[in-house]
Structure formats: structure tokens, C-alpha cells
Image (spheres, helix red, strand yellow):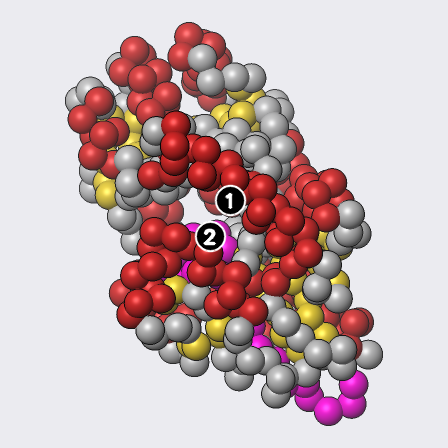
């Protein structure tokens, strides 16, 4: 294509700043004039890098109200009804609904998939009201069967698929029968951390950070540290926050929502990170802690096997049983105390996940498909 293509971007939800939104930020830097289409938008929860862009989203109050409770019925038609006729290239970035957008034969649609929807394919996920009671679980199971059919059909629509890890590449092949190209998402591996100590703690501590939701298994981690009595700092907010605070003993500190500066200061001065997610799609947080030269203790599964090297940049635990986790945390601390992890080697291990690397690989991939 000789002329500069007109680009649009479709992303599922713009209601928080997480790993998916960091990927979106990098894509937006590549295409500064591209409008962003999304199903839900809350500018109070987002960085200016996103809110400064042209955002197209449904403004009908009825749709948004229904969507809160019956999103499985409303999300797919929202994306299927967005009008992309004026664009040469549409990039969709997400997990479920946005890959189902409709484009013309002469348009190029590239989708970046963070994972096939966890809630449809048996992976651990955030709990919802549909988990409560046998009738709701039956309705959820019935709807999931229908949605899996739609999800398969939607996955055939993009011209090309990019996966965020080898783990996700395998899932895409298994559930959709499609080939894909792996481009790891961008991670801030050279963050300019302020030269100060944490405000919330003045003794050696372990760190855990992320959305405080059920499938992140913070409750199990808190039970383990209740037994150990060692300092743990938990960064993040979410639906489980009040429950977790209530069960935690005094050795566990919750920061709530933290700024990027505060989060990285806590990483810089921690002993290491513990990430409790099973079947992690990719896992940005363990990479962020390694960028500070600190090791990570993670579940031996999925994306963690790509991002954490046992004995070099961290350790694995095998299951979510409390006694097993306590023992693994003790072994992790012993290895740290004995200097088994080399900070410089750990930092070097994660340079391949930089934002600059992502932008170059993604831009090169898109250009190769446009030409």
C-alpha cells in the first residue's frame, strides 16, 4: 500500500489500567491518528495517553445499564455494529468481543489476542453473580455453550492473528484452529524509579500486586503469610479487597491503588514478588519485578514458564495448598538470603520484553501485511 493507511483500533473495555491497556498505549503510539472503538469507557480510571484520543463508545444509557448485568448478550452486537467502512486497517486488541468486528474484503483486520476468553474455556477467572446458585450456574453454562460458537466464528474473521505468548498461541490453535504470530506485549523494563524508600513499610518484605479478584488467589497468599507472620505488601484494588483486608493479620499491608512511581519503589526495595495466578496468559507483573533485579515465585504453568527461569530469575510452586505454598515461600526466602539470584542477570533476562521491542515487531508485522 503506497498511501498512508487510515487506521482504527478496537478494544473491549476502557475502564481500568492493566496489562491490556499498556499494550493499547503502545499501539496508539504507532498510530497517533487512529480513533479507538470500545464497548465501555470510564476516563476517570485511565491515563491521559488514552483519554486524549478520540474514543467511540455506546452512549445509550439503557445499553450500558443492561450491559452491566447481561454483557454476554450486548457485547458482541456492539462490536458487530461499529462502522469501520472508512478505514484501510483495523487493529483489534483484547480477548473476546472485539475480534468479532465486521470488515470488508478490501480492508485488513489484524487482531492481537491476550487470551481466548478464560470464562469460556475452563480457565480460572474472576467470579461473577452467575456463579451463585444452581439456577444461575445452569443459565451460565447454557449461555457459555452459545458463546463458544460465536467466539469460534468471530475468531475466523480477522485476516491475521497475533498472540501475546507461546501459551496463547497454543490456545488459539486449539480453540480456533488458526495459526498466529507471537509478539510479546510491552513491559516497562527500564522504568525510572524515584530514589526514595517506600512510605508504607521499613522492614524487609515480599510483594504481591494486581487486581484483587478471585482468580488471582490473593486469599491463599494471605493465609500463607498469616501462618508465616512475615511482612507482605499487597498493591491493588478490586472486588475482593474488603474480604482480604478482613482476613489479613497485622504483618500484611494493603496499599490500595498505587501510582506507577509508588509501585516501582515498592518493587525496587522488596525481597521479591509472589504471583498466585494459575494458567497465567503471559504475566506482566513477574517481568516488572525482574526488571528491578528481583526474583519472582510463581505457579508452574502456562505463561510463567516463558517469563520466569527457575533458579535464575525465580522459583515455581506446584499447587495452591497452603502448606505447600508456605514451604515454597520459605525456600524462596532462603535462596534470596543466600544470594542465589544475581540481580544483573535477572535484569538482563527481561530486556527482550521492552516497549521499544514490541513497537518495532508489531509495526514490522503490520507493514508486512499491508504491502
> Dots 1 and 2: beta carbons under 8 Å?
yes
Disc sitting over residue 96 in the figure = none
In magenta, the rendered stretch is: 1-21
Across and down, in percent, residue 93 comes to: 57, 61
Which of the 4 quarters of the picture holds residue 100?
Answer: bottom right
Within the magenta stretch, is there residue 213?
A: no
Residue depicted at x 30% and y 42%: 238
- Mark 2 lies on a secondary structure that is helix
Residue depicted at x 69% and y 70%: 109
Q: Which residue is mark 2?
A: 72
Question: Nearest the camera: 36 or 175?
Answer: 175
Q: Which residue is mark 1?
A: 143
Please give left or right for residue 244 compared with residue 88 in the image.
left
Please report whichever mark, 1 or 2, sits nearer to the chain's N-terminal start: 2
Task: Give the vertical position of 333 relative to 237 (above or below).
Answer: above
Please give left or right for residue 113 compared with residue 298 in the image.
right
Looking at the rendering, in which quadrant would you find the C terminus? bottom right
Name, please, the residue furthest toward the bottom: 3
Looking at the rendering, in which quadrant would you find the N terminus? bottom right
Residue depicted at x 30% and y 53%: 259
Which of the 4 quarters of the picture holds residue 112?
Answer: bottom right
Please give left or right for residue 155 compared with residue 131 in the image.
right
Amino acid at each position: 500500500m503506497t498511501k498512508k493507511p487510515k487506521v482504527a483500533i478496537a478494544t473491549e473495555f476502557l475502564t481500568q489500567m492493566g496489562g491490556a491497556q499498556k499494550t493499547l498505549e503502545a499501539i496508539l503510539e504507532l498510530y497517533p491518528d487512529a480513533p479507538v472503538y470500545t464497548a465501555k469507557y470510564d476516563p476517570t480510571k485511565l491515563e491521559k495517553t488514552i483519554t486524549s484520543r478520540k474514543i467511540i463508545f455506546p452512549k445509550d444509557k439503557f445499553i450500558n445499564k443492561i450491559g452491566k448485568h447481561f454483557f454476554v448478550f450486548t457485547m458482541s452486537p456492539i462490536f458487530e455494529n461499529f462502522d469501520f467502512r472508512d478505514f484501510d486497517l483495523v487493529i483489534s486488541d483484547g480477548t473476546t468481543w472485539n475480534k468479532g468486528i465486521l470488515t470488508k474484503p478490501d480492508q485488513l483486520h489484524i487482531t492481537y489476542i491476550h487470551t481466548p476468553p478464560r470464562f469460556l474455556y475452563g480457565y480460572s477467572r474472576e467470579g461473577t453473580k452467575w456463579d451463585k446458585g444452581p439456577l444461575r450456574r445452569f443459565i451460565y453454562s447454557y449461555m457459555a455453550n452459545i458463546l463458544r460458537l460465536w467466539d469460534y466464528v468471530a475468531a475466523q474473521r480477522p485476516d491475521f492473528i497475533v498472540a501475546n505468548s507461546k501459551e496463547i498461541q497454543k490456545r488459539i490453535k486449539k480453540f480456533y484452529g488458526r495459526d498466529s504470530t507471537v509478539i510479546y506485549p510491552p513491559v516497562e523494563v527500564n522504568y525510572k524509579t524515584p530514589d526514595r524508600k517506600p512510605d508504607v513499610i521499613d522492614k524487609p518484605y515480599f510483594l504481591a500486586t494486581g487486581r484483587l479478584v478471585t482468580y488471582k488467589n490473593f486469599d491463599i497468599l494471605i493465609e500463607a503469610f498469616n501462618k508465616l507472620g512475615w511482612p507482605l505488601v499487597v498493591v491493588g484494588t478490586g472486588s475482593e479487597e474488603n474480604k482480604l483486608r478482613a482476613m489479613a493479620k497485622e504483618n500484611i499491608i494493603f496499599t490500595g491503588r498505587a501510582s506507577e512511581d509508588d509501585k516501582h519503589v515498592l518493587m525496587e526495595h522488596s525481597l521479591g514478588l509472589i504471583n498466585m495466578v494459575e494458567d497465567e496468559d503471559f504475566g506482566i507483573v513477574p517481568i516488572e519485578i525482574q526488571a528491578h533485579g528481583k526474583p519472582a515465585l510463581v505457579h508452574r504453568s502456562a505463561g510463567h514458564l516463558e517469563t520466569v527461569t527457575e533458579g535464575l530469575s525465580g522459583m515455581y510452586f506446584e499447587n495452591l495448598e497452603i502448606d505447600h505454598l508456605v514451604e515454597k515461600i520459605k525456600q524462596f526466602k532462603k535462596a534470596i538470603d543466600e544470594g542465589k539470584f544475581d540481580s544483573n542477570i535477572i535484569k538482563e533476562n527481561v530486556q527482550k520484553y521492552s516497549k521499544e521491542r514490541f513497537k518495532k515487531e508489531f509495526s514490522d508485522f503490520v507493514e508486512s501485511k499491508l504491502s
